[in-house]
Image (tube, rainbow, N blue to C red):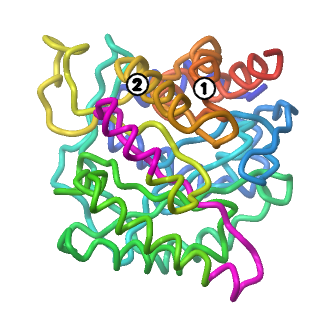
Amino acid sequence: MSLLPYGLARRFLFGLDPETAHDLTISGLARLQDSPARCLWREARVDDPVTVAGLRFPNRIGLAAGLDKNGRCIDALGAMGFGAIEVGTVTPKPQPGNPKPRMFRLPEAGALINRMGFNNEGLAAFVANVQRAKRFRAGGGILGLNIGKNAATPIENAVDDYLIGLDGVYPHADYVAVNISSPNTKNLRALQSDEALDALLGAIAARRDQLAAAQHKRVPVFLKIAPDLDAAQVEVIAATLRRHGLDGVIATNTTIARDAVQGLAHADEAGGLSGRPVFEASNRVIRQLRAALGAGFPIIGVGGVMSAADARAKLDAGADLVQIYTGLIYHGPALVADAARALARR
């Protein structure tokens, strides 16, 4: 068990502006992750190995992308007991993201709204940080690297950015996640439409085959999709994943819906809503994907996991693995172990 009760840390952090608290936490974790101070947040990792997409995950609980956009804290976050860590989203070139303020807490709903806009230091800095991380992967942890497009890149040229990203992260990733579902980059979600998705996944699959042949290893590629899709759209995405031989799907990103938070402070802020309000929408998409893809196709379930019971519900909906993010912000590292133990018992 971690030596620093998260309730104390949360009381301090929630007294700060959300992005200030985030930056302070990431900087602290990055600075202390190779020191004895990591015992302050360390949690014993639950041993519940499972093989998904040809990868052996130490347990079924992973960290969703977005918390550590630049890959600075992989070993620190791994010490919290995760079986997998996904970092990014990284874009080919550095970019500042959207204007501040751009992150908001909705504590009554156990939720966050963000419109960060893929703020990151760019691919070169990201890869350098990934290469410095040793401890988590040496202990068997799985590392996912999440790629996206620069805001300044026209949507018709988006494929170019994704191929640059894939080229850059491929040698260093256990799996690659292709993010086309953030609501905070203009027109990005248009890539989920039929023709655009077919072109993007076709190009990614072809480049992945080239990289696999050149580097003598095949890195699984997952597609991350939105919760704001109807059944017909999910069917098209499932068919396109199959057609191009992608290895899995991550369901889901944040939502633009606000039904569950109407009337709350900050509810009308633009951006993606995460946490408890996205739980049911995410599960619906997972169920639809499982029905369309059949047994055996890897699905990572993410969205609104605030408890061990929520993690079990993701598996009941059809997911193979579960990721958390907002739940970690509200409940701390103990949630990782609680959820992993619940899934091990299941």
Magenta range is 211-239
Label of residue 318 in the image? 1
The residue carrying pointer 1 sits among few (fewer than 14), some (14 to 19) or many (20 or more) residues within 10 Å by Cα, namely: many
* Residue 9 position within the rendered picture, expressed as x and y whole percent measured from the top left: 53, 27
Q: Residue at x 33, y 36 (%)?
A: 18
The image quadrant of residue 269 is: top left
Q: Is residue 268 left or right of residue 151?
A: left
What's the mark number on residue 275? 2
Kindly identify the amino acid type of the residue bearing the numbered disc 2. Answer: Gly
Disc 1 from disc 2: Cα separation: 19 Å
Considering the numbered disc 2 on the image, is that residue within a helix, a strand or a loop? strand
- Sequence-first disc among 1 and 2: 2
Percent position (x, y) of residue 238? 46, 44
Q: Which mark is residue 299?
A: none
Q: Find out whether the residues at labels 1 and 2 contact each other: C-beta distance under 8 Å.
A: no
In this rendered view, identify the residue nearer to me: 14 or 46: 46
- In the picture as drawn, the residue positioned furthest to the bottom comes out as 214
Q: Amino acid at mark 1?
A: Gly
Local crowd at mark 2 within 10 Å, few (<14), some, or many (≥20)? many
22 or 165, which lies in front? 165
Which mark's residue is nearer the viewer, 1 or 2? 1
Say which of 157 and 63 sits in front. 157
Q: Is residue 265 inside the magenta stretch?
A: no
Quarter of the image where one finds residue 103: top left
